Image (tube, coloured by chain):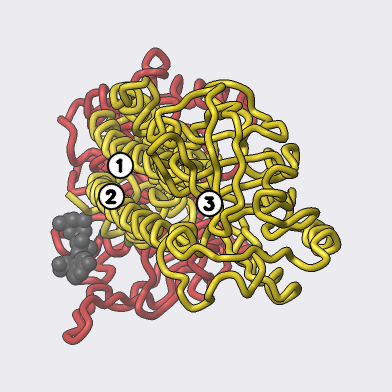
Chain colours: A yellow, B red
Amino acid sequence: MDLAWFLALKFLKEYRAQSLLTISAVAVGVSVMIFLSALISGLQGSLIRQTLGSQAHITVQPAEEVARPQLEGPGLMRRIEQPEQRFLSIEGWQSTSNRLRRDPGVVEVAAGVSGNASALRGSAERPVIVYGFDPDEFNRVIDVRSRVVAGRHEPSGSEVLIGVELARDLGIGVGDQVRLRTQTASETLVTVAGLFDLGSQQVNQRWAILSLRGAQSLLALPGGANIFFIRVHKIFDAEKIAQRMEAQTGLLVDSWMKTNQQLLVALKSQSSSSYTIQFFVFLAVAMGIASVLVVSVVQRTREIGILRAMGIKRSTIFMLFVMQGAVIGLSGSIVGAFMGSGLASMFARIAKAPDGSPTFPVDLTPNLFLAAAGAATITGMLAAALPARRAARLDPVEAIRHA
Amino acid sequence: MPEVEDTSPPLLELRDLRKSYGDKIKTEVLHGINLSFGSGEFTAIIGPSGSGKSTLLNQIGLLDRPTSGSVLVQGKKTEDLSEEELTTLRGRTLGFIFQFHHLISALTVTENVLMPLWLSGLRDREVAEKAAKEALAHVGLEEKAHVRADELSGGQQQRVAIARALIHHPAIILADEPTGNLDSKTADSVFSLMRRFNAELGTTFLIVTHDPRMAERCDRVIRIEDGVVASDSWRPKGG
Ligand SMILES: Nc1ncnc2c1ncn2[C@@H]1O[C@H](COP(=O)(O)OP(=O)(O)OP(=O)(O)O)[C@@H](O)[C@H]1O
Ligand SMILES: [Mg+2]
């Protein structure tokens, strides 16, 4: 084994230019892989983060409130356009909430009330969704606290938090008053305690967050709750957990994955096209390595012959070429990792949004480098296998006669 | 030495050795060779081009399997050995010198010379270095120890090949036209070197050559013609 290593390295060193060229080819391939992966996982991560920044992983509502079969497109929109007349509390919501909380996948359950209303200010009127939650529970599910851009983050009994867009639509700011009216003509006058920006235009336009008490009394649900917002540990388990909960409770349970199906489909096809590109890049790399090693076997036919005459084993000859492939793959991937991550960070630095945040966030994880190094090394070894087999099978007599 | 009656088997024995080439149309190149070689012999194999000398040497060297017949090394048949066992036996008992030296150009002179020792499993650095130094001293190339093999002249490379063939003290050295590619003066010195090792180490040499002057200086001359042994004669000692 150590002899195979020794010879593999010597052989690579002898035709230095040839080896370096092959290593560069691998490096280019690996850098493409790193760059693409970093870019795509960065983009996808930020898309998902953005989506989940203003949405609970799982939403639970009373079954009768929303007509079931109409769940196409974003569920929130649908409910805005089909306002309900009366709001029903979930029966025994405290025990249901506790039960949902015991699900091993769940981080936090926020129980609260929500309902449609209009926000009025002078002659302006905008449809809103009123929410009222326990503030601690709520912020553990959807982090509004850190995204309050003006004022305070916790509304008192007669206060409201609204989104920046709604504030602009109504022409109001922190400290101004706004009237909220439900379809049942229940009304309340509240003061804007703070403005939030949850990164979603729809949410910034529609959400009006009251204190739990304030919302309960506005929606005529004293002591009640008609919605649970749930945060789970693993975001991609959300749909599974939601289905489990629906079976358990008989309530209407929706996961973010269901309400964002199109996004997920888009992400998936993006990933698979990136994998396809990477596959072909690696195929090209493999063919490059293989062809160089095929040439190298021819170049070294006589030397292989004399080594065989001197008693080197076929398996050692085989290993010696496979190791050359491995060395080319591994060193190419190390160079490529630097090139790829350099490229990715440069790209991230250049492509910036006006506010300075990167428009193309890149996600360079150690796992990515390990995967790239592993893939390149294995590709190198597989590509070397065929020429290695040829070398191992050379007839020593023929090899020695080889001109 | 040939006259010595000995119950132990000869170092090397060929029994009705035949070799054919070709799949459909078989051409027999060696037609039943019977020969035996003792320890310490210095033999020339001569004969016209195409008569089968190299083919014979390749069978003896276990580089190729005969079509029929046996090659016995120290009394042991080799035809039933596996590829791997043959390889091991070859590495242990045989040394090769070829017309085109076949040094590994990626390695230094020392590394080339040490290859048979490494292949036999020696890993002790000091022992190896010492052996290489000695072997190179024998062929007068001490000062080239750390030069890359392909930077040497043809004659120097052939001397390195001899050092390499000898370093693990094989019982038999097979040389196929070892001086065929050298000018006569260099050829002379390479030949003398082989004779010296034969005398000093008792190594058996089998040398295929076209050079009649060289054949004259061997103890035994075997003439191959059309795949059979045409003559096998011993030169009188001290002649
Ligand atoms: N691999 C092979 N396939 C087919 N025929 C072969 C092969 N090797 C050798 N021969 C034939 O066997 C015969 C003997 O060849 P060999 O090389 O043994 O001759 P030689 O005595 O060494 O000749 P030279 O002195 O020219 O080296 C030749 O007719 C040659 O064409
Ligand atoms: Mg020949």
Report how far apart the C-alphas of labels 2 and 1 lie in the structure.
6 Å
**Subunit under mark 2:** A
Q: Is residue A80 above or below residue A350?
A: below
**Subunit under mark 1:** A
| Residue A117, numbered label | 3
Residue B28 in the image: x percent, y percent? 23, 79
Q: Nearer the viewer, residue A285 or B9?
A: A285
Residue that numbered label 2 is attached to: A281
Q: Is residue B213 above or below residue A262?
A: above
Tell me whether marks 2 and 1 sit on the same chain: yes
Residue B135 in the image: x percent, y percent? 48, 26
Quadrant assignment for ligand 1: bottom left
Q: Nearer the viewer, residue A340 or B86?
A: A340
State yes or no: discs 2 and 1 in contact (Cβ < 8 Å). yes
Q: Secondary structure at mark 1?
A: helix
Instruction: Please say whether residue B202 is visible from this viewpoint.
Output: no
Q: Secondary structure at mark 2?
A: helix
Q: Earlier in the sequence, mark 3 or mark 1?
A: 1
Amino acid carrying label 3: it is Ala
Q: Residue at x 29, y 27 (%)?
A: A351
Q: Residue at x 19, y 26 (%)?
A: B185
Residue that numbered label 1 is attached to: A29
